[in-house]
Image: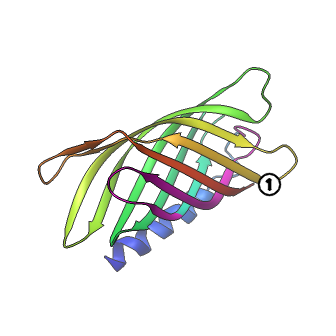
Amino acid sequence: MKKHCALFFYMALSLAFAQQASAQKGSSYENAVGMRVEFGSKYGTWAGLSGKHFFNENVAGEMMILFGDHVTLLEPELQYHGDIANAEGLKWVLGFGPGFAFGNGTSDVLLRPLAGLDYKIADVPINFTFDWRPAFVLTHGTDFNAARFGLAVRYAF
């Protein structure tokens, strides 16, 4: 488990800092690092770290590690961002990624679509994200939970 956490942190830091010069700016920032909270019915509340990197103007990757209820969730995502007319710094986001939950004597694999909003405050290095992120659990009898939401606050650069 410790090896997985160390590998995840390395990947998140690499994602946040690598290829910065070659990436184009999306939503007026290229990278963001901060915290994320996920909440909703079932599975409790999870909180942890989030790193985001734009590969081009619209496509970004986000890596997160969340902790809660004796579970650690590792989640890489690919996201597409689109402009919202007349709303500077605000973009809509659609994305998808796998989730890997470890804890309580078991491990699970999840599929995680998301839809939400991403906002970067003009001239301030702060980024906010609010999204709907249902969880499809594919292991141990399968499960689905539509009532999951996330909130991230990050330092954007």
- Kindly identify the residue that appears in the image at 35 percent across and 39 percent down: 146
Query: Horizontal placement of 30 versus 97: left or right?
Result: right
Please, which residue is most extreme toward the top here? 85
Residue 13, quarter of the rendered image: bottom right
Q: Residue at x 13, y 54 (%)?
A: 140
Question: Looking at the image, is 11 positioned above or below residue 57?
Answer: below
Vertical placement of residue 12 versus 132, above or below: below
Q: Residue 20, image x and y in percent? A: 68, 52
> In the displayed structure, does residue 150 sit left or right of residue 75?
right
Where, by quadrant of the figure, is residue 136 drawn? top left
Task: Please name the residue shown 76% across and 36% down the image.
Answer: 89
Q: Which residue is mark 1?
A: 125
Given the current orientation, which residue lies at the most extreme left position? Answer: 141
Over which residues does the magenta segment extend?
25-48
Q: Secondary structure at mark 1?
A: loop
Q: Position of residue 28 (x, y in %)?
A: 77, 40
Picture quadrant of residue 51: bottom right
Q: Is residue 86 visible?
A: yes
27 within the magenta span: yes
Residue 11, above or below 128? below
The reply to whether residue 54 is visible in this rendering is no
Quadrant for the N terminus in the image: bottom left
